[in-house]
Image (cartoon, rainbow, N blue to C red):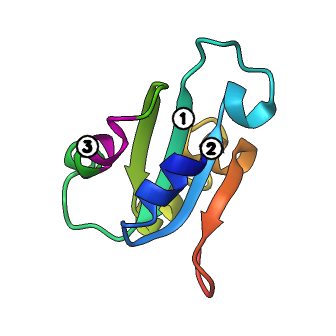
Amino acid sequence: MQTSSVALSKRRSRRRSSFSARARGDARADSDFDVLVIQESDEPRYRRSAPLYVALADLPAEVEVMVYTPEEVEEWSQVPQAFVTTAVREGTTIYERPGGT
């Protein structure tokens, strides 16, 4: 996942977390990497991850990237079963910009 972290560092993210089987340490050989990126963006959510997929295309593993804004994370924070809330709560932080989440 270190290569992924380097590629993701080119983006202006506030926080990156890995979640699901890889973060819990119970992944199988064919498990993908799931990464939540929290960053400012004016783009619709469905368009935000495209540049990251391009940057990560040469990895020898599948990577699933979801990008949410800090405002969206806050908006969903009171819904415990929401995807982004679960990812933030259960994920392992792989990068957090100093001074802000």
Residues tagged 2 and 1 counted as in contact (Cβ below 8 A): yes
Q: Residue at x 27, y 49 (%)?
A: 45
Q: CA distance from mark 2 to mark 3?
A: 18 Å
| Mark 3 or 1, closer to the camera | 3
For marks 2 and 3, the one nearer the N-term is 2
Q: CA distance from mark 3 to mark 1?
A: 15 Å
The amino acid beneath tag 2 is: Ser
Seen from the viewer's position, the closer of residues 41 and 24 is 24
Furthest-bottom residue in this view? 99
Q: Which residue is mark 3?
A: 54
Image quadrant in which you'd find residue 25:
top right
The amino acid beneath tag 3 is: Val
Q: Residue at x 21, y 67 (%)?
A: 42
Q: Residue at x 20, y 52 (%)?
A: 44
Give the x, y percent position of residue 77: 60, 56
Say few, some or many: other residues with alpha carbon within 10 Å of mark 1 (under 14 / 14 to 19 / 20 or more). Answer: many
Query: How many numbered marks are there?
Result: 3
27 left or right of 3 in image? right
Marking on residue 69: none
Seen from the viewer's position, the closer of residues 77 and 12 is 12
| Mark 2 or 3, closer to the camera | 3
Say few, some or many: other residues with alpha carbon within 10 Å of mark 2 (under 14 / 14 to 19 / 20 or more). Answer: many
Q: Is residue 30 visible?
A: yes
Q: Which residue is mark 1?
A: 34
Q: Which residue is mark 2?
A: 18
Residue 70, placed above or below residue 45: below
Q: Is residue 79 visible?
A: no
Say few, some or many: other residues with alpha carbon within 10 Å of mark 3 (under 14 / 14 to 19 / 20 or more). Answer: few
Q: Residue at x 43, y 57 (%)?
A: 8
Image quadrant in which you'd find residue 40:
bottom left
Q: Which residues are magenta?
A: 52-58
